[in-house]
Image (tube, rainbow, N blue to C red):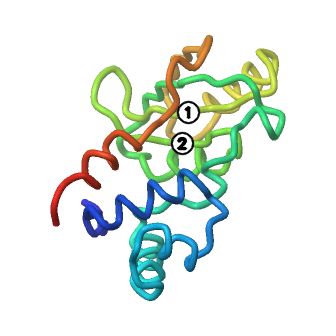
Amino acid sequence: MSKLTPVDATDARILLALDRDPQATVVALANDLQLARNTVQARLRRMSENGALSRISCRVEPEAVGYPLLALVTVSISQRMREEATRALDSLPEVVELLATTGDGDLLARVVARDTGDLNRITEMLVDMPGIERTSTAIVLRRVRSLRMDPLLERLAGSRE
């Protein structure tokens, strides 16, 4: 399913330190965590290469680039056109995340928009895409809690390797 190498307690400590100071150098992290510089550098490289660390752009808030509206769009697709539908959805920059799901739809798209008029434009584009049969859109009114990993990392960092 995934090529990820599981993160261990040392990796978790490194990731928590990066959360505290995203600009920290490898040397600073090594000093702070009392680890060898080569150890920190090798672990960061491994986590980047195997996908445990996402791209930096994933940390950018959509509001900061002019897209304050967030919507969750359930997408039902023609099973025979799964690849075409996925490629079409991938081509739309406002679709910032796409998840295959169970339930009422086949895919859940996290969509950002400038305003409700822009969201209407985007949803009209979605239903015109090949392989997409229907959509259902829910506008996010407010973010109660952002995606967080620190409690899981803190638990793992506290465990013994």
Marks 2,1: beta carbons within 8 A = yes
Residue 84, relative to residue 160: is it above or below?
above
Q: Give whichever of 81, 136 is nearer the camera.
A: 136
Which residue of the protein is positioned furthest toward the left in this rendering? 160
Q: Quadrant of residue 92?
A: top right
Name which residue lies at 69% across and 46% down. Answer: 60
x, y percent for residue 121? 77, 25
Residue marked by disc 1? 110
Neighbour class for label 2 at 10 Å: few (<14), some, many (≥20)? Answer: some
x, y percent for residue 102? 28, 30
Cα distance between the residues tagged 2 and 1: 5 Å
Q: Amino acid at mark 2?
A: Glu
Name which residue lies at 24% across and 60% down. Answer: 1
**86 to the left or right of 123:** left
Quadrant (top left/top right/bottom left/bottom right) for the C terminus: bottom left
Residue 122, relative to residue 33: is it above or below?
above
Q: Give whichever of 78, 20 is nearer the camera.
A: 20
Task: Decide which of tag 2 and tag 1 comes sooner along the chain.
Answer: 2
Name which residue lies at 26% across and 61% down. Answer: 9
Name which residue lies at 29% across and 55% down. Answer: 157
Residue marked by disc 2? 97
Q: Amino acid at mark 1?
A: Arg
Which residue of the protein is positioned furthest toward the top in this rendering? 141
**96 to the left or right of 118:** left
Q: Quadrant of residue 111?
A: top right
x, y percent for residue 34? 40, 74
x, y percent for residue 13? 37, 60
Q: Quadrant of residue 7?
A: bottom left
**143 to the left or right of 157:** right
